[in-house]
Amino acid sequence: MSLQNQVVLVTGAGRGLGRAIAQAFADEGAAVVLDYRTSGDAARELAEKIGADRAVALRADVTDRAQVDALFAQAREHFGRPVTAVVNNALPDFSFNGDARDKADEIAYGAFGAQFDGVIAGALNVIQAALPGMREVGGGSIVNVGTNLVQNPVVPYHDYTAAKAALLSLTRTFAADLGPDGIRVNMVSGGLLRTTDASAATPEAVFDLIASSTPLRKVTTPEDFAAAMLFFVSDWSRAVTGQNLVVDGGLVMN
């Protein structure tokens, strides 16, 4: 598939899953905006590897609307055209280690608030900042990163899962609202990925258990997940919106 006409903004693109997503789009010919908050060196290194004509690394905290607006303005200035697709991947600091997470009788609402600020406020800021450019070109694609824990809450990531469940709701309501503008909104949801910075604390035995529980007998990698993202930005998905694709080797079947 060719994505040469697309300018794709990936939030949290300096490392881990975001980096794999940005690389996947670049490999298919898209111009890529690599948003980062703290991983500037890694984001700039990837942008340099892809090439200045097709990639730029820009810093913005997605929870700050002014920074997000500046991000879109800088991206347009660099490429000379608006962003046509966004991937909401940025995540508040979180360690995917179930043994270290607060259980139901311990967790405070502040933990939920922190996740909602990052996941929902961040996605909202990015989507709203993207809309003028997408409307200018007659359409666009928004892809939100979700989790299969919404369907299969096997570990007590209460705050993280609640925020991602809200993001799924936002995906569907925004799809209905923005469809008349030719703007599609979808979600790709993964399980535990092998391996990102966030999942580095996960015990190896947990990875092995997940692998043995999937029909494909493997744990999904960031590259596996990123490949599924391409469909939702390509013209192949031109009639698809409001959907949630679970990419976890078949562990959760919708």
Image: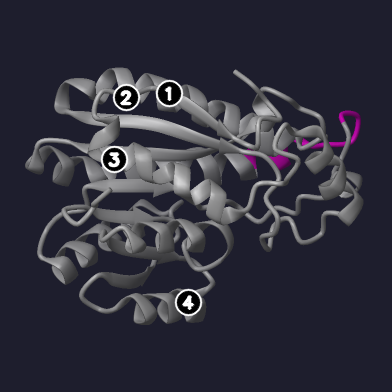
Q: Given contact means CB atoms under 8 Å apart, are the residues at marks 2 and 1 in contact?
A: yes
Q: Is residue 211 left or right of residue 43?
A: right
Pair 3/4: label in front: 4
* Residue located farthest toward the front when viewing the structure as drawn: 216
Residue stretch in magenta? 104-113
Q: CA distance from mark 4 to mark 2?
A: 34 Å
Determine whether label 3 and label 1 are within 8 Å by CB.
no
Q: Which residue is mark 3?
A: 128
Real-space Cα separation, disc 4 to disc 1, in angstroms: 32 Å
Say if 79 sits above or below 179 in the image. below
Residue drawn 67% across the image and 22% down it:
151
Within-10-Å neighbours for mark 1: few <14, some 14–19, many 20+: some
Q: CA distance from mark 3 to mark 4?
A: 24 Å
Location of residue 234 (image quadrant): top left
Viewer-nearest residue: 1 or 188:
1
Residue annotated with mark 2: 240
Between marks 2 and 1, how big is the CA–CA gap?
A: 7 Å
Q: Nearer the viewer, mark 4 or mark 1?
A: 1
Query: Residue type at mark 1?
Result: Gln
Badge 1 marks a residue whose secondary structure is: loop
Q: Residues within 10 Å of mark 2 (few under 14, many from 20)?
A: some
The answer to whether residue 188 is visible is: yes
Mark number displayed over residue 243: 1
Label disc, if present, on residue 40 of the rendered structure: 4
Where residue 247 appears, as percent x and y from the top left, is 58, 36
Q: Where is residue 229 shown, x and y percent of the image?
A: 42, 44
